[in-house]
Amino acid sequence: MTTGLLSGVTVLELSSYVATPLAGLTLAQLGADVVRVEPPGGAADRSRLPVAASGTSYYWSGLNKGKRAIEVDLTTPEGQDVVAELAAGVDAVIANASHRGAAGEAALRARSPRLVHVQLTGRWTGEASVDYLVQASSGMQAVTGPAGSGAPVNHVLPAWDVAAGLYLANGVLAALRHRDATGEGSSIALALEDVALATMGNLGLYTQAQVDGVDRAPDGNYVYGTFGRDFELADGTRIMLVVLTTRHWRTLLEVTGLADGVRAVERGLEIDLDDETARYEHRELVAALLAPWFARRDLAGLVAACEGRRLLWSAYRDLDAAARDLADNPLFAPLDQPGVGSHLAPGSPLVVDGLRAAPRAAPVVGQHTREVLAERLGADRCAALLGPDHPHDHLTLDEGAHA
């Protein structure tokens, strides 16, 4: 089941790794028919870790749920012609590499002026880049990690890839709306590094550096600009606490019984910890006041003390512990993925009119080549390309010669 908002929209995805496959997945979960084009044998990211005992990539399967997959050799003129024929009949093309010949952007849009073509590059200059290089060049790693470590710390989540994928999906949707209104297609380009630079600029990090000359440093798990930090409980559990508002702060003082002591400290230092900025500036003092209270309680005791108090905290969990709770969340549903088996997989986080797109299996290599070619190009053209009794549903240079 999908939400159906994009029913009737077909997207050709010429992509690999995270950002562009995520864009395709997002559109597929909204009801689009997303056809992923891969080279014979499958794209390089099909074997990326983590993998099942069968060799099937959990990573690849997760990012390509609900798509159709075809094999076309885009290094050959024949394969490029086939992609051009397919692109002439679809709504959008998503790519993360420049393609040659008939499959190049200019050729595709000349053939189909209504086409929406969206392409991801590494940098605005056209140079290649990947998420972890963008982390380095953007400066984000300089404020990530433990205080005083002196070494850059990359974020393990490919956050810029994820943000880029959602930007790309947004671009497709905006361009389709424009086409519906004007009949004109669009050419949209997005640089991965620009996603990071724009985000950090929008959050004020670069503005602060430019205007105030502030060179921020890593500060562990403290939350910048407010009070938030991790604490260890008596049973060894570590929790993260965030105090966003004055209400949160006063409630925390009530729960911990520290109100009188904190007021005495405020009078002695002539500070007002009801103020968010003051709590941040004096974060180490606040943490020192709170730490003994947390250290005297186990997780059950903390839950009991905070029940009904609307404080913002969570215990840290490892992946195994988090995975054990997935069945309680309607986001997840059973999925039987070839090469992986039955497991709980996420559908779309979007809930539209009370409905959520359920997860659908990712395709095996070339699973839909014959189906898509016959459907989009016609049975005769499909037979000419693959032959009526072709044992493998993909195109190579020799087979493409039939074209």
Image (cartoon, helix red, strand yellow):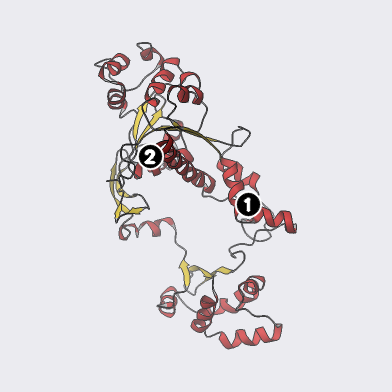
Q: Quadrant of residue 46?
A: top left
Residue matched to label 1: 201
Q: Position of residue 119 (x, y in %)?
A: 51, 34
Residue matched to label 2: 64
Residue at position x 68%, y 86% in the image = 267
Total marks placed: 2
Callout 1 secondary element: helix
Which is nearer the N-term, disc 2 or disc 1?
2
Q: Amino acid at mark 1?
A: Gly
Residue reaching furthest to the top = 401
Callout 2 secondary element: loop
Q: CA distance from mark 2 to mark 1?
A: 31 Å
Quarter of the image for the C terminus: give it: top left
Q: Position of residue 385 (x, y in %)?
A: 32, 16
> For this rendering, which residue is in front, 32 or 128?
32
Q: Quadrant of residue 305?
A: bottom left
Q: Amino acid at mark 2?
A: Asn
Q: Position of residue 363 (x, y in %)?
A: 33, 35
Q: Is residue 377 left or right of residue 173?
A: left
